[in-house]
Amino acid sequence: MKFRSLFGSVICGLPLVVCAVPDETGQVALTSQLQPLASQALVLDIKHAGDTLVAVGERGHILRLLATGNWQQVLTPSRNLLTRVTFVDANNGWAVGHDATILHSRDAGVTWQLQYRSETLARPLMDVYFRDAQQGLAIGAYGLLLRTQDGGKHWQREFHDELLNEDDKQYLQQLKTDDPQVYQQEADSILPHFNRLLPLPDGRLLLVGEMGLVAVSDDLGAHWQRLQFPYEGSLFAAKEYNGQVYVGVARQPVCQRFVIAVVAVNCIAAGSHYQWHNSGC
């Protein structure tokens, strides 16, 4: 099998190009840019966009694979690190990253527009999933979950207390009565980090995250059922393969890597059919 270096073939010599216009508050907002040093930058995700590939990474870098086999950097309206990219069809794609940044492309990644960003929130989004060109979710740190039902024109934040453990639920309920101001502060950061969304073959959606979080939803994340899981650390990856779901577990030291395998997709709701596999060093 032949492997090719992504950044070994990035088209270099691109000048720094920055365009900015005032936003509704009067402050200057970045609309497009080409940041330097793309050939040395970290790439965090690569996805298919029709018959090409699109890669995202640090400094807001986005690159497209050309027919020549080279990678071309494109203009993007963000300097924030981008963590994830997805395309729902050959043209419509979204990239997410730090400061709750959400970018959208309508032309297979050639051009990008800023749909959402919150420097006040200042939290990274870790994953994005669209069921179709209208309905989508973006998830991230401290239980951040944003939903759109109009292709990203509007994003609404949601709080899902069903993903808390019982002690935290009781704690919040008591705070809500005793001190509403402190309740708001605690509710803003009490949820675990949400790291990955995985669509299942039966139409359900799996969520994994910090503190051994594994949850499933049958209504695109409007409601979640938290599942029992034999590990209380951070979960960063999930993949369905041949009727089974594999969840990646991060452990220290590095050589102690484990994978949790759910026996079958149709057993997930029961929350008890797990097998522990040590992948070795």
Image (cartoon, helix red, strand yellow):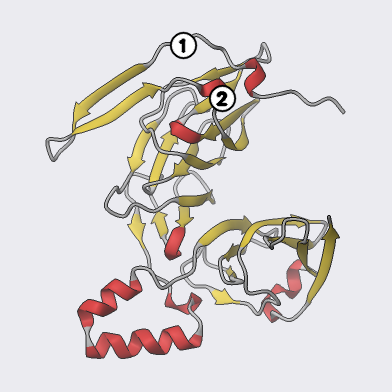
- Helix, strand or loop at label 2? It is helix
Q: Nearer the viewer, mark 1 or mark 2?
A: 2
Q: Nearer the viewer, residue 98 or 65?
A: 98
Position of residue 49 measured from the top left corner of the image (x, y, whole percent): 59, 31
Per the model, the C-alpha gap separating discs 1 and 2 is: 13 Å
Which mark is first along the chain, 2 or 1? 1
| 185 left or right, relative to 221 | left
Q: Identify the image quadrant of residue 39.
A: top right
Q: Which residue is mark 2?
A: 40
* Three-letter amino acid code at the position of disc 1: Leu
Position of residue 44 measured from the top left corner of the image (x, y, whole percent): 58, 39
Please name the residue shown 15% across and 38% down the image.
24
Q: Nearer the viewer, residue 105 or 201?
A: 105
Q: Is residue 201 above or below residue 192?
A: above
Q: Quadrant of the N terminus?
A: top right
Please name the residue shown 49% across and 63% down the image.
193
Q: Residues within 10 Å of mark 2 (few under 14, many from 20)?
A: few
Please name the residue shown 56% across and 33% down the image.
42
Q: Which residue is mark 1?
A: 14
The numbered mark at residue 39 is none
